[in-house]
């Protein structure tokens, strides 16, 4: 409980400094990944991108840095999440994404929250954006395949899992997921082919024998 209060106090302090002129960035390099459950923003830094502009009425107005705005709303989302206000957290995080639409970090956090609230279809565009920004990260394709499977879009799930296996044929988990969907769809011979590949790589994989037994009963 004490640690939770300290974290909340730190977030409030960070937000305060941002309001008086500090900002942060949440961009990551292409190919860089972070653990899914990590929910730590970068340390705030002073942004030199904020410049004054003269309006038509002669008044001076500061130009808003969208990345700084995104960081501010990310902090608000984190605060709401720490207080259990998950719907408010989604609202703030969506605003953060609107300000920084090319942040993989923000899109991934939105996917995690939407999966938690079982808004699986809403999560799909965000994970697609992650793939667009970092096409070589197969974990995003696996997540997209999972979301398609959960929402009963099996053909799309099969397509994503096959793409993953094309790039990483040794991924046991994905081959099992693909086999399971093929069985559900009644595509038993295709499933058997995948299961035989699994057992060729690991003949002690009990679950593959179980699935193969189910398939053989249908053939």
Image (cartoon, rainbow, N blue to C red):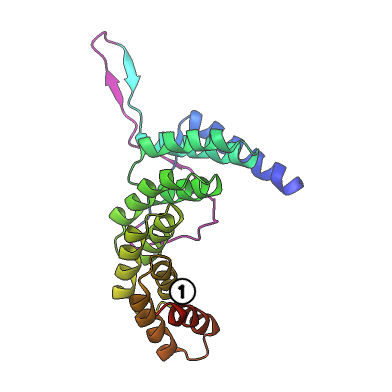
Lateral position of residue 51 relative to residue 209, left or right: left
Q: Which residue appears at 55% of the width and 35% of the height?
A: 87
Which structural element holds mark 1? helix
Using the image as rendered, state which of residue 160 and residue 113 is in the foreground.
160
Q: Which range is magenta?
A: 29-58
Q: Position of residue 120 (x, y in %)?
A: 46, 48
Q: Position of residue 56 (x, y in %)?
A: 23, 11
Q: Which residue appears at 50% of the width and 37% of the height?
A: 90
Residue extending furthest toward the right: 1
Lateral position of residue 163 relative to residue 90, left or right: left
Q: In this rendering, does residue 25 appear at all?
A: no
Q: Height in image: 42 above or below 9?
A: below
Q: Which residue appears at 41% of the width and 66% of the height?
A: 181
Q: Height in image: 99 above or below 199?
A: above
Residue extending furthest toward the left: 56
Asked whether 34 falls inside the magenta stretch, the response is yes
Q: Quadrant of residue 192?
A: bottom left
Q: Residues within 10 Å of mark 1 (few under 14, many from 20)?
A: few
Q: In this rendering, does residue 66 appear at all?
A: yes
């Amino acid at each position: 409980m004490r640690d939770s209060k300290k974290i909340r106090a730190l977030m409030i302090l960070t937000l305060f400094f941002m309001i008086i002129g500090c900002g942060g960035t949440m961009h990551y390099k292409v190919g860089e990944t972070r653990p899914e459950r990590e929910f730590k923003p970068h340390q705030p830094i002073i942004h030199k991108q904020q410049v004054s502009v003269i309006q038509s009425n002669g008044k001076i107005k500061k130009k808003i840095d969208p990345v700084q705005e995104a960081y501010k709303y990310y902090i608000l989302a984190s605060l709401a999440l720490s207080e259990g206000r998950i719907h408010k957290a989604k609202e703030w995080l969506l605003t953060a994404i609107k300000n920084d639409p090319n942040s993989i970090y923000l899109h991934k956090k939105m996917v995690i929250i939407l999966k938690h609230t079982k808004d699986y279809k809403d999560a799909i565009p965000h994970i697609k954006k992650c793939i667009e920004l970092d096409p070589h990260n197969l974990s995003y394709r696996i997540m997209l395949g999972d979301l398609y499977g959960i929402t009963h879009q099996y053909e799309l799930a099969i397509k994503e899992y096959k793409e993953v296996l094309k790039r990483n044929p040794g991924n046991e988990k994905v081959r099992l997921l693909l086999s399971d969907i093929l069985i559900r769809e009644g595509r038993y011979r295709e499933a058997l082919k995948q299961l035989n590949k699994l057992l060729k790589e690991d003949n002690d994989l009990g679950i593959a024998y179980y699935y193969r037994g189910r398939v053989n009963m249908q053939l």
